[in-house]
Image (tube, rainbow, N blue to C red):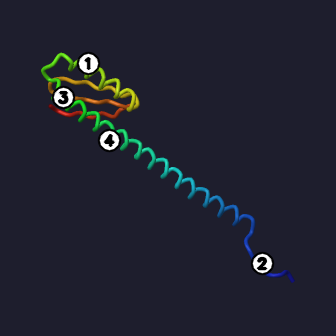
Amino acid sequence: MKPPHSGFSLIEVLVSLLLLSFILLSFDSAEIAAFQKTRDAYYFSIAINQLNSMKERFRVFKNHSELEQEIKLWNLQNQEILPKGKGTVTAQQIKINWGNDACLTEEM
């Protein structure tokens, strides 16, 4: 007569480890997505600050010849603090592009 089986078989242990690994991998992907959203929000807040900075410069230097120099300085700052940062200023709007497809526009 065989003794009754107690404990887990090797197959049960392997299946439970496989399920646990899938669960942990899904947590990793959620964490990566959260980091990406945080990074996007950070760059968006920087772009808003840069946009407000240019609005102030535009108000101060509106009728001066120094406005063109201020726009160049502003664009240099955009390139330094935003990935692929580039801004354009017209009489009607201020626009900042960064990253691959991010854009922020303010009408004047």
Gap between marks 1 and 4, in whole Å? 24 Å
Gap between marks 3 and 1, in whole Å? 18 Å
* Whether residue 68 is situated above or below residue 32 in the rendered picture: above
What element does badge 4 sit on? helix
Q: Which residue is mark 2?
A: 5
The disc label shown at residue 6, or none? none
- Choose mark 1 or mark 4, whichever is in front: 1
Q: Which residue is mark 3?
A: 93
Which of the 4 image quadrants contains residue 98? top left
What element does badge 2 sit on? loop
Identity, as a three-letter code, of the amino acid under mark 4: Ser
Which circle's residue, 4 or 3, is located before the other in the chain? 4
**Residue 85 placement (x, y as % from top left):** 36, 28
Marks 1/4 in contact by CB < 8 Å: the verdict is: no
Residue under the point 73% across and 71% down: 8
Q: Is residue 93 left or right of residue 37?
A: left
Residue under the point 51% across and 50% down: 29
Which of the 4 image quadrants contains residue 47? top left
The disc label shown at residue 45, or none? 4
**Residue 30 placement (x, y as % from top left):** 48, 52
Gap between marks 1 and 2, in whole Å? 84 Å
The disc label shown at residue 69, or none? 1
* Whether residue 107 is situated above or below residue 8 in the rendered picture: above
* Whether residue 97 is situated above or below residue 22 in the rendered picture: above
Gap between marks 2 and 4, in whole Å? 62 Å
Question: What residue occupies the far top of the structure in this picture?
Answer: 65
- Choose mark 4 or mark 3, whichever is in front: 4
Identity, as a three-letter code, of the amino acid under mark 3: Gln
Identity, as a three-letter code, of the amino acid under mark 2: His
* Whether residue 12 is situated above or below residue 54 in the rendered picture: below
**Residue 61 placement (x, y as % from top left):** 17, 24
